[in-house]
Amino acid sequence: MTRSSVCVDASVLLRFLTPGPLSEVAVAAISTWLGEERILVAPTLCAYEVASVLRRLVYLRQLTPDDGDAAFSIFRALDVRYIHRPEILTRLCPFSGHALNPTTVDGGPRSEIDEPWV
């Protein structure tokens, strides 16, 4: 049986790792996915985004250094599979022939975006 994957965004991971609005929702979602043995995938940049925000929260004293270290340890233990597909760059931001949407994810036909990642 093939395990299905779910692509997680840095904002979801940060809500999972830190207290705040929607943290409970993120904890429930990620806990469910892990319980279902789903494969967590994310763009390579996600790891840098998470680390950067955690450092900023510690710098701003919104997290203690110990809490920042603990959050980053939990993040590293999540076993997120990072994906880097240079060919996707050619499809991220086409303007002609596509409806203009405010996000890059909607920059191409669904069949191109929904290719297997793992």
Image: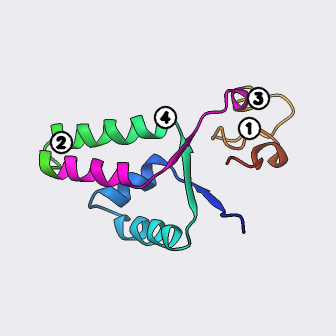
Confirm whether the magenta stretch covers residue 79: yes
> The residue under label 3 is which amino acid type?
Pro
Disc 1 or disc 2, which is closer to the eye?
Answer: 2
Measuring from the top left, give residue 96's x and y in whole percent.
Answer: 83, 28
Q: CA distance from mark 1 to mark 2?
A: 35 Å
- Residue 118 seen by the camera: yes
Q: Position of residue 81 (x, y in %)?
A: 53, 47
Q: Residue at x 61, y 33 (%)?
A: 84
- For marks 4 and 3, give the one nearer the viewer: 4
* Residue ID at (49%, 67%): 34
Q: Which mark is in front, 1 or 4?
A: 4
- Residue drawn at x 36%, y 57% is 15
Separation of marks 1 and 4 at Cα, in angstroms: 19 Å
For image coordinates 24% across by 37% down, the residue present is 56
For label 3, the SS is loop
Look at label 4 and name its amino acid. Answer: Leu
Please state the extent of the stretch shown in magenta in the rendering: 67-89
Q: CA distance from mark 4 to mark 3?
A: 21 Å
Residue 99 falls in image quadrant: top right
Q: Which mark is residue 107?
A: 1
The residue to which callout 3 is attached is 94
x then y, percent, for residue 37:
55, 68
Image mark for residue 45: 4
Q: Earlier in the sequence, mark 4 or mark 3?
A: 4
For label 2, the crowd category at 10 Å Cα-Cα, with few meaning under 14, some 14 to 19 and many 20 or more, is some
